[in-house]
Image (cartoon, rainbow, N blue to C red):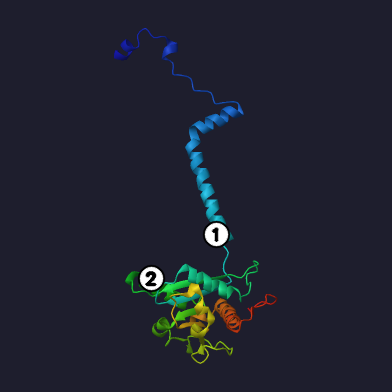
Amino acid sequence: MAREWALRGMSEEELAPPPKPEPPKTPRGKIENYWYHYKWHTIAAVLIIIVSSVLIGQIVTKDSPDYTVVLATQNYVSDITRERLESELEAYGRDIDGDGKVEVMIDAISFTADTQYGLANSTKFIAHLAAADIMLFIIDKESYDSKIANTEVDGYLFFTPIGVQVTGLEGDGRYWNWKEDAIRKDEAMQGMPENLFFGVRSVGGTSEKEDSKKIHEQSLELLRAYLTKKPLSNEKTVSK
């Protein structure tokens, strides 16, 4: 009764529900209708696609170095020093991946007195030893004595014999000490330790994987070229 009283005087047309809006029929109308309802959804989707494309592109096009080297010292090594050492080694290396340039990447590890930072670097150093993913090591005397002097790789001493006759060889020819070399006088090397050993780890134990053997041969070849000052030719490839 109350409803009838409230609706008295209204026609059937007025009481009928409003008709559903007709969908746009022209292409422009359809686009405008879509944009009105889904504008921000579309913008968000486009941004996600752009960001994902950039990240995937960076991963796909990332250029891996021809050689990777561990530089382990008690103190922090500046980027200038690290980059100078990289360029020094690059001058004697081989374009292994065939991208038209020789690239050396140095992973600098500092066993500093900072407990947290030093522990993180010690963990990273141990991880490299276990993975056998890097074979060429540059390490100062103090770190060598405390970390690997008494370390064996499947019964072999940590460093393999270099196999060249040059001034500065120590440890029965298993590593080279730069203390008498001209590179120590380079301005970029200020603050670096007097005794810095260059060596290639032995192949054995966890490093018996084929990839590790190949990296071992490439690293040994690079170190020999650097010590004898005879840049490698890219006419041949390293045995695999």
Q: Which residue is mark 1?
A: 59
Give the residue at x 47% y 38%: 40
The numbered mark at residue 120 is 2
Residue kind at label 2, given as amino acid type? Ala
Tell whether label 2 touches label 1 (CB within 8 Å): no
Q: Image height check: is 122 above or below 50? A: below
Write down the quadrant of residue 130 in the picture.
bottom left
**Position of residue 53 measured from the top left corner of the image (x, y, whole percent):** 55, 51
Q: Image height check: is 4 above or below 36? A: above
Give the residue at x 53% y 71%: 84
Placement of the N terminus among the 4 image quadrants: top left
Kindly tell me whether residue 135 is visible in this rendering: no
Placement of the C terminus among the 4 image quadrants: bottom right
**Position of residue 159 measured from the top left corner of the image (x, y, whole percent):** 50, 86
**Position of residue 148 measured from the top left corner of the image (x, y, whole percent):** 43, 84
Question: In the image, 129: left or right of 163?
Answer: left
Residue kind at label 1, given as amino acid type? Ile
